Image (cartoon, helix red, strand yellow):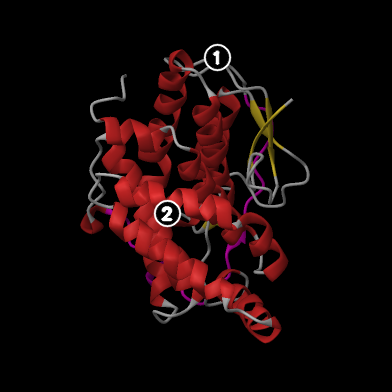
Amino acid sequence: MSFGGSCHSMDWLTSRGRAFLYAFLSTSFRDHFTLEKMQRIMNAEDLAILTSHLARLDLPEAPRVSTALAAVTAAWQKADAYQELELQKAYARLFLLPGGVHPYESIYLGNQNLLMDKPWEKVRQFYRNLGLEKDTAELHPEDHIAVELGFMSSLAYMTAAAGKGSRQDLLAIQCEFLIAHLNRWAYQLACDIRGKCCGEDFYWLVSELLDGLLTLDNQAFGEEKPQESNQKKTGREKFGQEKVKQEVVPKGRSRGRRRGSSQPLPGRLSAKDDHHAPAAGTAERT
């Protein structure tokens, strides 16, 4: 598989700015908002470079991503100690308390409303086929949105640093993961988050940025954004106020190598906030 039909597409897919956006979103969904964390990962230099890159990028979704990024940046920059506490409460309402959304692929694509259901097994096997295991420091399961976005961020950073000969293999892995996993549920997750927030809320803006980034990647890879009618109805319609059940899945999966993939990427899926290193829930080389 070759990615290079458009110089703008390849410019985006191999940029550090793309990796930075995946890392920021991974961190935003991993745990509650803090000003210290935002100041550390959203530095002015990286934002200026990314904003300039998006402005000259000739892909249809680029203006929307640029607008969403500017709105997210403005939202956290004006936050004070009181608003920081309010954003921490908003995170709890959205992702921790009954009646919120449950950002796990198993909940969105599984059939039994279980955590660590068959979709989780498939995600975990995808990582294992690349030689990756979840670090014990990462509290979320492998199919949590923060871990999946962190995985993409890590590979995107590797792509930006790789030579031309290695980039195609890394991009093929990212395209496969986008199609097989994120495309199938993350758009609906973003929609569910927006359904529980008003348009000025920080997490409404973050979910808009997630939607835009996935669409921009689909355009760069030459894939079509999934139609809403083809996405499984989940979120509020599926579990409402229900408690999410957890299933214990036996350990013991073969490691192996994915057919058609590059060499395995030995490492661990770990939790980090520093976007200059592999991001939250991402692959860490050992």
In front of the other: 196 or 169 = 169
- Secondary-structure class at tag 2: helix
Residue type beneath disc 1: Gln
In the rendered image, the vertical position of residue 164 relative to residue 253, given as above or below? above
Asked if residue 212 is among those painted magenta in the image, a careful observer would answer no
In the rendered image, the vertical position of residue 25 relative to residue 137, given as above or below? below
User: Can residue 242 be seen in the rendering of this structure?
Assistant: no
Separation of marks 2 and 1 at Cα, in angstroms: 34 Å
In the rendered image, the vertical position of residue 12 relative to residue 49, given as above or below? above
Counting from the top left corner in percent of width and height, residue 234 is at 39, 63
Where are the magenta residues, as a range?
A: 231-253
User: Can residue 231 be seen in the rendering of this structure?
Assistant: yes
Residue type beneath disc 2: Thr
Counting from the top left corner in percent of width and height, residue 260 is at 42, 15
Asked if residue 238 is among those painted magenta in the image, a careful observer would answer yes
Name the residue rendered at 42%, 57% in the picture.
210
In front of the other: 30 or 233 = 30
* In-image side of 270 versus 25 (left or right): right
According to the picture, the residue beneath numbered tag 2 turns out to be: 51
Name the residue rendered at 39%, 64% in the picture.
68
Q: Which mark is residue 263?
A: 1
